[in-house]
Every structure is written in C-alpha cells, then in structure tokens.
Image (cartoon, rainbow, N blue to C red):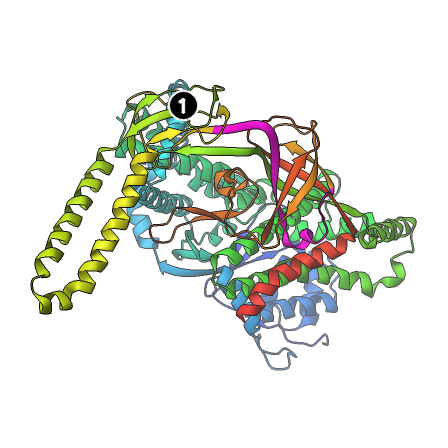
C-alpha cells in the first residue's frame, strides 16, 4: 500500500449512530449495515478515519487531513487493517488499484454445522414491524413506570394473601401431574413466552427501533420463541438497553401479580390450576432462567448493557484465560482488556464463572441427549458434544501452552504448578482406592410387606404399631365386593360350560369337533377360579412368622378401602438384620465374601453399623427389590418404572448392578433404612476406575453397532 492508494467508497446504505462513551471517556459509534442487519463497533480512531473517506481521494490526502484536524498520527498498517475489516464485511466498494479480495463467505465444516444445528437453530417466522407499530398505542401503558409500580404493589399484596395459604398453594402443584395438568402447563408456557417476546418487541418500538423478525429457536430440539433485538445497539443510553432486556421479565411479573390474585379468589379446579401455572412459570422462569447472565438469555444482555460492556462472554473468556495463565505459570502477558482494578477483576471472575457453569451445563446436556435419543445415536451425539464443547476448548488452551513450552517453568509459579501436577498424577496411578461405596438398605433378615391381594375394604384390624404377633395369628380381615362378583361370574361361566360339555356328549360328531375348545376354556376358568379362591383366602391376613408390626399405615381403620398398591404394614422378625447393597459392575470384582464394611444411614453421617459381606450374586439384578434406593422414590440409583401387560410394576435400574448381602457383626434391630455402605475392597488405581466406567458405557453400545 502506497501514499497514492485510492480511498474506497463506503456502502451508501450504511448508517452511523453515536453510542455511549467508553470506559476511558472516549466516544464510540455504531456502524449499521441495513442489508445484513449488522452493527459494528467503532472507536474514536476508526471514526476519524471513516468520517473523512468521502472527502479524500488517496491515502496521502487522508493522512494530511488527519494530521491537521486531529491529534492522530496516521499509520499505513492501521489504515490497511481498517480496509481489510471493511472489506471482509462488505462495507466498501472495491476500487481500481486497491489490493483487496472480495469478502469471503463464512463456511463451516459439515461436522460443525451438524453439531451446532442439532443443538441450536432458529426459524424466523414473521416480520412484525407494521403490526407492532399499529398496536403499540393500545398497549403503551403496560410499558410505563406507572404500570411497573402498580404490578409490583399487586404482586406484594398477592404474596401477603398467599402466605397464609402457603400449604394450599404448594399443594396445587400436585394437580399438574396428570394429562390435563401437563397440557395446561404446555399451553400456559407457550402463551407466557409469546407475551415475553412481545414485551421485548414493543419496547423496541417504544424507542423507535426496528424489529426485523420474530420466530422460534430450537435448543437441543426444544422450541422457544425469540425476538431479533439487535437494533438495540443503536441506542446510546444504557438505561434504554437495560429496559429492552428487562421488558419480557417485567411482563411476566405483571402476569404473576394478576394471576396470584386470581388463584386466591378462584375455587379449586381448572381456573386455579391455570393461575398457579402462570405464577410458577412466570416467577421461576424469570428468576432462575431469564435473569441468568452466564447464558445468553435476558440476564446476559441486561448485565452487559448496565455495565456498558459489549460482548461480555467473549471478553470474559479472554480475561479468564489470561488470569489462568498468570495464576498457573506466572506469565506477565498484557491483559486483553484495558480495564483496570475492579472492572478487570470482574471480567476474570465472570469469565471463570461462565466457563465452569457451561462445563456442567454441556455435560448435563450430553447426558440428557444420551438418555433421550435412541441407541446408539444417543451415545454418538453425546460423544460429539463432549468433544466439541468441552474437549476441543481445553485442547485449544493446551495448544497455547505447548507453543510456549519454554515459558512454562520460567517463573516460580510455573515450577510450583508442575510440582503439584506431578504429585497429583502419582496419586492417580497409585493403587490407593481400597474401598467401594454403594447404596443400600438395612432390613430385617425375615420380614414381609403386607398388601391387599385385591382392591378391598378393611373390616377388621387386629394389630397396632410395634405389637408382637405369632405365626398364624389373624392380623386383619378384608372384604372385596369386586372379587366376590368376579368369583361368582367365573363360577357361573364354568358351570355353563360344563353343562354344555355334558349336553354335547350325546352327539359324538359335535363333541369331537368342540371338545378340545370347550375343555381348554373350562381349564382356563378353573385356573382363574382357583386364583380368585386364593385371593379370597389372602383377604384374611395371617402372620407368616413370629415378629413385630412395623411401618403401619397410620390411615388404616375399619371400613377404609385399600388398593393393591397400599402398604398396610410390615411383619418383621427383629432377631437379626441384613443389609442389601447394589454394587456397580466395575466394582463387583474387587470385593469378596467376608470383607469388612460399614453402613451409614442417610439421616446420619456420623454413626456407623459394622458389617461383613455375607453373599455376592453372580448375575446383575433385573429389578430393584428395595424401592428406597430407586431414583423414582428419591434414591441414588437411576431407575424407572416398567410394566408389561398385566404383570406388576417393576423398578428397573438403568445401569448394571449386582446385589451384595451383608450382615451386622452384632445383632442390632433397625427399622428399614437406606444409606451408603462402604465395603473394603482390593486396591485399584483411581485412573483405572474411570476407564472401567468408559468400558461399561461403550460395551453395550458397541454390541448394537
């Protein structure tokens, strides 16, 4: 580039908007390109260059003009960088002699496109500008300070009214666990989020901005509404930008205030459930999700606008990496941000908080994808996401460290870091992991859960909590009108078929043709009748052995109706306890019979019960017979309910587990209690545990492939 290089002409569609001042007080501008709907940040130096483009023909003229009219000292390299930036974004028209290539279109690899598109993609649906401008006068009041103040007062009043009925309010939550409740939540959520986005859009109209489109975005295939509010960059004041970011949340809080009053006035039913859904979704969605600045939701843009920091995540990440290198290796690199003091510390801490939050978020999404998608695609998508969003960023930072390997131990801080890492690696590869932790349940060695054999009515209850009972003693009597009806109908059907069989014995040809079918139906009815007879006998509940009544249902009384799923009580022989533990596949080979162990109840982290291993099953469990450890009932073992045909509901674990039975060293009676069992095991390297886990994860999937 020479002093006689011609100055290109700027795209005539460009618009220049003055922005808020930078941290050091220098003015900023926004360059808006309407065709691509993009905003570009310009500092004072770039503005001085661009404002003189139309007044000069060559770089020599531009440099002379800058020297005379400003305090800048023109630099050819800086000018070339500016031209390259303008050319890359299609903001200038090429001229003869200017050594610039046409702006290249950004291309992504097929893998990159697939990864980003299945995790996040958007579909613009409408161009709402005319509709918003036409309807804004009718809704303008809702975006005023007065409306916000009224909504806040109404919300406080509703909260005071609800406080006295808090138990009733939270109990409404149970109504949502039904098909009608799920449909209500889905409909309410859709309407609320649509109004949320209209709040953003109308606030843009309030400040004379353009809303190019609204649509639906898909995050991990989950649809959410969105509004394009990039035009907020054109606003110079921070308050207006914050108001646009808060508009959706403010509208949701207004809805929460109104429907909190509706809930207090409505009778139990559909209207009260709808009101509860609106309040819960509005408050929880606003406070827990939309205000979260660690993701690119409303809270992120609100925080950035309030602090006057654009691209908050990108700048925070850069400062976090700078702070990490300084902390680990003592590198004296210049901070990527000119900010000093508290502003710099904030960016470093914010960057670290966002990185840690996103690590666990992406790990959680990877686990969710693995569980939701059919195998083996769930595993493939999980691996791709972990590699792309967790492993590759880590490798990118490691690449920087490797490129500066000579500086890694240049400072004392780097030497200390390597010493600590070396010691930690030794512990990873030393066989020091000499125990296995597993969830389990303490229970009596001999006990029986007593349920009704058929939906029935309790007519006589002969026991109470902690009462001693003897073998054969009648504990309760139940009656079932439904069972008696089924028994009688089955008996009548059986008698009719037997009569039909006897009548047909006089006709040899007819008997030969129908005998097999009639006999089969008669045999089925006899089996069914025998089953009903057994259930009738079981309605008279007798003690199976000597023991005590425990965990008795406090709602039992004569005349109460019970279902087959209602636990009536337990009969427990208190002479001896056993402990059932569920051990993972990678740990089962490390424990042996008679190994010592100890049990810690979930309600106590201090008291322990000494145990030893009594038996180890050689095959993995198909069903969890101890519901207390199941995630379905709040336990630590991830599992789900399963029912096939008319069989009873089973609790099926989602991982391979083996049952281990342990025995206390001294007889001691405890009620049925869940907790954690620590079993003495063969020593193993911690790193091998991780590889065993990977092997257990990939082996079933490889068999599918």
Residue under label 1, please give it: 167
Closest to the observer, 255 or 205: 255
- Pick the quarter of the image with the N terminus: bottom right
Residue 115, x across and y down, in percent: 54, 65
Residue 93, x across and y down, in percent: 55, 74
Is any atom of residue 260 visible in this view? yes
Left or right of 526? Residue 253 is right
- Residue at left offset 46%, top offset 37%: 284
Q: Which residue reaches farthest bottom?
A: 96
User: What is the span of residues highlighted in magenta in the rendered image?
Assistant: 571-595
Question: Is 579 inside the magenta-drawn segment?
Answer: yes
Closest to the observer, 266 or 176: 176
Left or right of 668? Residue 341 is right
Residue 187, x across and y down, in percent: 32, 45
Closest to the observer, 556 or 507: 507
- Residue at left offset 55%, top offset 42%: 292
Left or right of 117? Residue 491 is left
Closest to the observer, 420 or 414: 420
The quarter holding residue 277 reads top left
Where 262 falls versus 401 (above or below)?
Answer: above
């Amino acid at each position: 580039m020479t002093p006689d290089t011609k100055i290109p002409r700027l795209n005539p569609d460009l618009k220049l908007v003055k922005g808020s001042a930078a941290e050091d007080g220098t003015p900023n501008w926004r360059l808006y390109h309407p065709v691509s709907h993009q905003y570009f940040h310009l500092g004072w130096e770039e503005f001085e260059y661009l404002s003189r483009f139309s007044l000069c023909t060559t770089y020599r003229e531009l440099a002379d003009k800058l020297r005379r009219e400003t305090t800048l000292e023109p630099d050819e390299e800086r000018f070339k960088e500016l031209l390259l930036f303008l050319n890359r974004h299609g903001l200038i028209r090429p001229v003869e002699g200017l050594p610039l290539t046409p702006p290249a279109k950004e291309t992504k690899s097929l893998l990159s496109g697939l990864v980003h598109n299945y995790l996040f993609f958007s579909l613009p649906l409408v161009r709402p500008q005319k509709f918003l401008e036409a309807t804004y006068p009718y809704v303008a009041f809702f975006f005023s300070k007065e409306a916000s103040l009224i909504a806040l007062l109404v919300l406080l009043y509703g909260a005071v009214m609800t406080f006295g009925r808090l138990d009733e309010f939270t109990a409404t939550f149970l109504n949502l666990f039904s098909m009608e409740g799920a449909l209500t939540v889905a409909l309410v959520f859709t309407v609320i989020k649509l109004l949320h986005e209209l709040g953003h859009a109308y606030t843009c109209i309030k400040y004379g901005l353009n809303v190019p489109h609204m649509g639906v975005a898909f995050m991990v295939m989950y649809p959410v509404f969105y509004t394009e509010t990039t035009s907020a960059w054109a606003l110079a004041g921070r308050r207006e930008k914050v108001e646009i970011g808060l508009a959706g949340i403010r509208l949701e809080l207004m809805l929460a205030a109104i429907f909190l009053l509706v809930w207090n006035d409505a009778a139990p039913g559909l209207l009260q459930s709808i009101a509860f859904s609106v309040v819960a979704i509005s408050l929880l969605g606003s406070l827990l999700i939309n205000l979260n600045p660690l993701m690119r939701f409303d809270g992120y843009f609100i925080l950035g606008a309030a602090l006057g920091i654009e691209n908050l995540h990108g700048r925070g990440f850069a400062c976090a990496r700078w702070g990490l290198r300084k902390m680990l290796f003592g590198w004296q690199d210049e901070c990527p941000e000119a900010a000093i003091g508290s502003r710099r510390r904030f960016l470093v801490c914010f960057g670290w908080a966002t990185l840690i939050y996103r690590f666990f978020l992406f790990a959680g999404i990877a686990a969710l994808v693995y569980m939701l998608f059919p195998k083996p695609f769930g595993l493939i998508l999980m691996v791709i996401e972990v590699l792309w969003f967790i492993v590759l960023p880590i490798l990118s930072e490691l690449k920087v460290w490797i490129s500066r390997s000579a500086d890694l131990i240049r400072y004392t801080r780097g030497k200390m870091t390597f010493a600590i890492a070396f010691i930690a690696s030794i512990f990873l590869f030393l066989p020091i992991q000499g125990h296995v932790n597993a969830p389990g349940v303490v229970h009596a060695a001999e006990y029986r859960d007593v349920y009704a054999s058929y939906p029935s009515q309790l007519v006589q209850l002969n026991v109470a909590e902690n009462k001693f009972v003897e073998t054969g003693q009648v504990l309760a009597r139940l009656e079932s009108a439904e069972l008696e009806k089924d028994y009688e109908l089955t008996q009548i059907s059986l008698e009719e078929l037997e009569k039909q069989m006897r009548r047909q014995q006089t006709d040899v040809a007819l008997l030969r043709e129908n005998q097999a079918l009639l006999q089969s139906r008669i045999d089925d009815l006899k089996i069914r009748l025998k089953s009903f007879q057994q259930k009738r006998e079981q309605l008279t509940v007798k003690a199976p052995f000597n023991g005590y009544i425990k965990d008795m249902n406090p709602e039992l009384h004569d005349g109460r109706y019970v279902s087959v799923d209602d636990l009536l009580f337990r009969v427990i022989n208190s002479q001896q306890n056993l402990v059932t533990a569920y051990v993972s596949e990678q740990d089962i080979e490390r424990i042996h019979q008679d190994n010592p162990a100890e049990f810690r109840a979930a309600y106590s982290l201090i008291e322990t019960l000494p145990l030893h291993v009594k038996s180890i099953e050689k095959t993995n469990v198909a069903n969890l017979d101890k519901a207390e450890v199941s995630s379905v009932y709040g336990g630590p073992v991830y599992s789900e309910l399963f029912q096939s045909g008319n069989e009873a509901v089973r609790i099926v674990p989602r991982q391979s587990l083996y049952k281990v039975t342990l025995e206390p060293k001294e007889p001691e009676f405890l009620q049925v209690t869940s907790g954690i069992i620590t079993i003495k095991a063969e020593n193993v390297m911690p790193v091998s545990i991780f590889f065993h886990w990977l092997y257990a994860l990939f082996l079933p999937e490889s068999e599918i492939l």
